[in-house]
Amino acid sequence: MKQRFEKYDFDVLLLEGSYVSDPNVRRAVIEDGNDRCGVEEYASRYFRRQGYSALRVENEPIAALFGVFMSPLIQDASDPHGRMFGVGDRFAFEAGTQGKIIWTRLPDDFGKPVYGVRRAAAIKDHLRTVTGEPDQLRRLFDLWLGPSEDLRQYLWGHRSEQIEVARQLIDILPFGSILEMLQYLVEDYWARRSGWPDLLIFNEKEFFFAEIKSERDKLGKNQQRWLRDNQERLQFPFKLVEVRRMELQAEAGT
């Protein structure tokens, strides 16, 4: 365990579960009483029994949060690098139909480090407007939600369930953490949009992100990059949760 993750500084929580074989499901399936579920739900149930709430996160709700709060900056009409970009309607694509083209204004260098450098002063000024208590941030989120729709489609942060999770993040995360997340993403969006952990675990006193792995899962390259960036920059509380096969756990103790 230590050898696998020695270059990262975080807690590893070991859970045990009864894995079942299901040829119709590609992902790992675990028995939980009379029910069957994936490892993320299995870990969520464990944390709920410990008195926490569990919110499924990953990448798309982060894209929705970013798209809403950063749309006035990214779509700034005064930016001389602004261009119109067209993408296929994401809702139509997910429904398997032919949709219309969604047009959105984007800087031609958006998502690259050069954009963060070029627009550093504008980014700083914009983030000053994203201020306040959670209720004020929610009102700002709702105010910018509609105008950000085309940008959120471009970023794959368009679905209602992603928007709802983004709203919950406003209530759960400290204001400073939200600002740091937005700053981190806008500086190099395409390199940093992926690798976000599976779950946000929280109660009234604390929160932490959790990445859930089954017995054979390994950390992907984007996840390893996020772990490095989190350790060096973001500093969100984090745990890695490994769900081991119950029989193997028993053998390890003999």
Image (cartoon, rainbow, N blue to C red):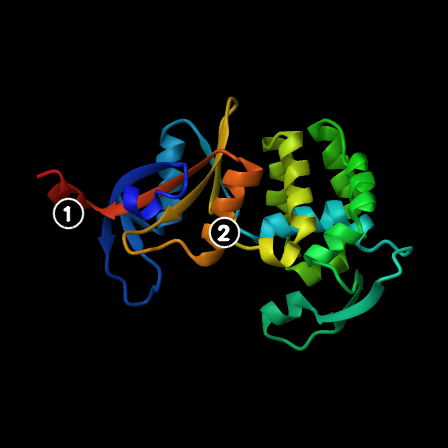
Q: Which of marks 2 and 1 is nearer the N terminus?
A: 2
Q: Residue 196 carries which label?
A: none
Q: Disc 1 marks which residue?
A: 247
Q: Quadrant of the N terminus?
A: top left
Q: Which residue is drawn at 34% across and 42% down?
A: 6
Instruction: Compare residues 95 and 195 and report the one nearer the observer.
Output: 195
Q: Disc 2 marks which residue?
A: 225
In the figure, is residue 220 to the left or right of 93? left
Q: Residue furthest top?
A: 205
Q: Determine contact: label 2, label 1, CB under 8 Å.
A: no
In the displayed structure, 60 sits above or below 208; it is below
Instruction: Compare residues 94 and 130 and report the one nearer the observer.
Output: 130
Residue 131 position, x and y percent, is: 76, 32
Residue 214 position, x and y percent, is: 32, 51
Residue 119 position, x and y percent, is: 80, 50
User: In whole angstroms, how far apart are the C-alphas of marks 2 and 1?
Assistant: 32 Å
Q: Residues within 10 Å of mark 1 (few under 14, many from 20)?
A: few
In the figure, is residue 146 to the left or right of 184? right
Q: What is the quadrant of residue 135 in the picture?
A: top right
Q: Residue at x 73, y 34 (%)?
A: 137
Q: Residue at x 74, y 58 (%)?
A: 151
